[in-house]
Image (cartoon, coloured by chain):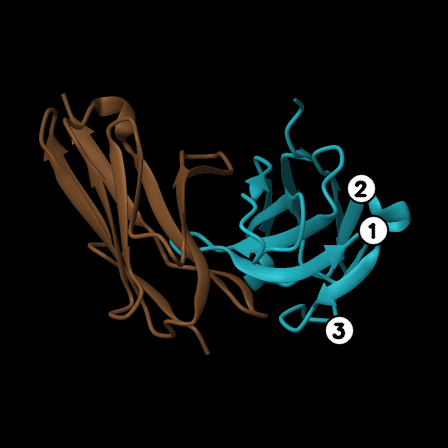
């Protein structure tokens, strides 16, 4: 059974700092991995999707990497802004198991 | 393009009462999901529909939860009778095809349930 963990559970950084969020999964037989953002009281917004054959994806200040063999993904946020404050969740798409989500990392970027 | 619509946004009920949530997915999306998200946790899949057929309901507590997707479009999730531990956000999501084909999954804003 696939299990997804995220470290750290919470992170507080000053504005302008670069930061890395980590996601680990136990079963490397995944189809793809997706990073989501969730604002308080809102649903999830997809940030980046990495296919299993890819190593990374970039969108603006966000860069996500995937190392399937080691069961890890990282989300790198460059030059963080207060507007980046949210919970970031990763989810793996397992063959035949649908999306399995991690518990999320709660990010606070302080002005 | 309109997103995934859910209603009601907020609901407070007493334990043992019933509640129903409605979801309208993005037009043309074949796959619809209901997730339960308890505070501080990631979403957990309750049920997945492909058109109007159930693909996965292995984590749906069938003694109290039911869901249907008539005509392969909108869907209703019902809880009867509710328990205190059902307090959570119920997220509806949709994707163009079944997850595993590389499609992005789109979420609604959720229906927040508090059982007192």
Q: Secondary structure at mark 3?
A: loop
- Which of the labelled discs sits on residue B51, or is there none? none
Give the percent coordinates (x, y) of residue B31: 70, 50
Q: Residues within 10 Å of mark 2 (few under 14, many from 20)?
A: many
Q: Earlier in the sequence, mark 2 or mark 3?
A: 3
Q: How many marks?
A: 3
- Hue used for the chain lettered B: cyan
Please say if A40 is above or below B31: above
Report which quarter residue B55 is drawn in: bottom right
To which residue does mark 1 refer? B69
> To which chain does the residue with label 3 belong?
B
Q: Residues within 10 Å of mark 1 (few under 14, many from 20)?
A: many
- Hue used for the chain lettered A: brown
- Which of the labelled discs sits on residue B74, or is there none? 2
To which residue does mark 3 refer? B63
The answer as to whether the residues below labels 3 and 1 share one chain is yes
Name the quadrant of the C terminus of chain A. Answer: top left
Q: Nearer the viewer, residue A95 or B12?
A: A95
């Amino acid at each position: 059974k696939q299990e997804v963990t995220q470290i750290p559970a919470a992170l507080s950084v000053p504005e302008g700092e670069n930061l890395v969020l980590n996601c680990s999964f136990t079963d490397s037989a995944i189809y793809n991995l997706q990073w989501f953002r969730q604002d308080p009281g809102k649903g999830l917004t997809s940030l980046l999707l990495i296919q299993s054959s890819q190593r990374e994806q970039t969108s603006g200040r966000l860069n996500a990497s995937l190392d399937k063999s080691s069961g890890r993904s990282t989300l790198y946020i460059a030059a963080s802004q207060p507007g980046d404050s949210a919970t970031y969740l990763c989810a793996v798409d397992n063959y035949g198991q649908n999306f399995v989500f991690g518990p999320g990392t709660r990010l606070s970027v302080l002005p | 393009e309109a997103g995934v619509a859910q209603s009601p946004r907020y609901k407070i009920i007493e334990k043992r009462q019933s509640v129903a949530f409605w979801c309208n997915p993005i037009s043309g999306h074949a796959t619809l999901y209901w997730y339960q998200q308890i505070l501080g946790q990631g979403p957990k899949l309750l049920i997945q529909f492909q058109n109007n057929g159930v693909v996965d309901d292995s984590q749906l507590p069938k003694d109290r939860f039911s869901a249907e997707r008539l005509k392969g479009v909108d869907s209703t999730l019902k809880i009867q009778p509710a328990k205190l531990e059902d307090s959570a956000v119920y997220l509806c999501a949709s994707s163009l095809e079944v997850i595993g084909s590389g499609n992005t999954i789109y979420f609604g804003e959720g229906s927040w349930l508090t059982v007192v």
